[in-house]
Image (cartoon, coloured by chain):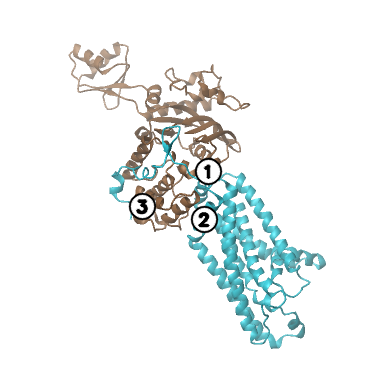
Amino acid sequence: MTAGPEDAGRPPGEGASTHRDVAAEDGAGRKRAEHRPASFADAVAAEWIKIRTVRSTFWTLLAGLVVTIGLSCLLAWVFVSAYDRLGARDRLRFDPTAYGLAGINFGMVAFGVLGVLVVTGEYATGMIRTSLTAVPRRGRLFAAKALVLGGVVLVVGEIVSFAAYFLSQLIFADRHLDAGLGEDGVLRAVIGGGLYLTLIALLALAIGTLLRHTAGAVTTVLGLLFVLPIIGSFLPGDLGRTVRKVLPAGAGGAIMNTRPSEESLSPWAGLGVFTLYTVVLLVAALLAFQRRDA
Amino acid sequence: MIEARGLTKRFGEKTAVDDVTFTVRPGHVTGFLGPNGAGKSTTMRMILGLDRPTAGTVTVAGVRYSGLGTPLREVGALLDAKAMHGGRTAHNHLLLLARSNGIPARRVDEVLDLVGLRSVARKHARGFSMGMGQRLGIAAALLGDPAVLMFDEPVNGLDPEGILWIRTLMRSLAAEGRTVFVSSHLMSEMAQTAEHLVVIGRGRILADTSVREFIAANATSHVRVRSPQLGELGPLLARRDWRVEVDPDGSLRVYGADPAAVGDVAADHGVRLHELSPVQPSLEEAFMRLTGDTVEYHAGGRPVPPAPEAGPVSTAREGGAPPAAPPPPEASSPDLPPTAPDGTWRGGDA
């Protein structure tokens, strides 16, 4: 399937000259057309093509969708099945919304992997050098990447979050445990689930940019989201509780609570803390991206 | 037009590119010649803003690369083949590059035709052969119809047909008035395509001159003589002011003579000649001599700078940098240049 010999003998450059008719003469006597400078919107459009033309995008999003919705439903079903054997205290503390979104705490890995791959995929293949010759303003390239990734994960994340919510509430409705969207904090929690996934993807993008290596970056994201809470759980007393509240997963997950809990920050404060982590890492990644040789 | 002024890149202790100054002009193919590891790729990466220079500046069309409004319309570059995501199709790869610079999408099909990849446009790049990858990289370089083109080792991994194609392409691009800057470690390749040479060794510019002048300055031509009566002829020739060497194949190399004079001597003494031909020295020969000198120079420590003998380029040096060391006197053959009309024996600028 290689290029045929007929291409090789053909005088090259003839196609190259086809669209040099609009013109002004430049210093060297060549005809040069005037063009509008490339804009941020052009960089965003290119990033949009990038993200939708590799398979990893589809597969990570599909994995995120299946894991989040599947686990949310599975856990809802397990809870409903075990409901009769639960004590009064457990029944009282039951938060149907947070429970129905529980799958997000696992599905988030897939969205994190997507965030990592969006940038480490470029480093692994060498595409980053081509990207930077096309868009040499690195701040622009990075911002376009973050915007497109954020947009894609926000849309998919909200779909996933709402789907997980509705399906799990259908299961809870069996025992009349379900919470309606109109109830206090429920809509915020469900929308917040999608926001949390978006922030996770952006945090992963930042880590991927800093480390430039897929395996290392994915490991780091997993460490931040899953290993830190385990370490936190070994810390004793009030100190432990405070630390657990502000660890990334604990803080970010708070947005999905509709019942106040001593174990976590208030929903918006929690998401605010997670946003802060994300912003700090994004800024660090941008600075590194601008300073380093590609 | 590419202009590098005092361009320097250090990686830790190692100086990859050392105070390099040169200008690549439009209208002909300029070869960027040097052994592997001489600093060619690093220099090209600095031109494209991929690597940040430790010192010095480099501009394309008078501006830093990152300051170009639509870089792909100004500069097309093939740095390494397959600097692309293998999971993307050739068409999509080019489409996103076009989109990033506001280049119309129809241009994608034009360049795919141009490089002969139309039939595999919808195939994933990871399935491409080396040669197809090179073609796709060249398609990307041509996408914006740029006035400046840079190719880093473009013939690497190509079959003879592809090599021929690329040579023709580069020449025709230059003939259209574009600036074409091609790196290679292959002297023979440069001899085939380039008219002008920027020679780099160990991060320093060793010469910036036309191919012909470079060869003339760095290697000497000779006359090749074959005769059944070499035993007679040799001494006759050696008696003149010519240097005569015997080649392993039994022919003679006569330096400092023209073929007519050699033929006359033979005729005067009734010696039969079976061959009498002028031999132009190869670029390879010239290059080996030149870089041989640099190696010697580097092994010998810091030489004494000779009197400055350079053109206007010498003023472009960044202040404060130590003067570039020139080839030491003992390492320079008497026939080494300053060669080019623009005073470009740059190694010795001070």
Q: Is residue A243 left or right of residue A204?
A: right
Near-viewer residue (A39 or A50): A39
Residue type, label 1: Gly
**Can residue B184 be seen?**
no
Q: Which chain is cyan?
A: A
Near-viewer residue (B250 or B202): B202
Q: Are marks 2 and 3 on the same chain?
A: no
Residue type, label 3: Leu
- Above or below, B342 relative to B82: above
Q: Colour of chain B?
A: brown
Crowding around mark 1 (Cα neighbors within 10 Å: few <14, some 14 to 19, many 20+) is some
Could you say whether the residue bearing mark 1 is in a helix, strand or loop?
Answer: loop
Residue of label 1: B69
Crowding around mark 3 (Cα neighbors within 10 Å: few <14, some 14 to 19, many 20+) is many
Residue at the far right in the pictured view:
A238
Q: Are marks 2 and 3 in contact (CB under 8 Å)?
A: no
Residue B327 in percent (x, y) is at: 50, 23
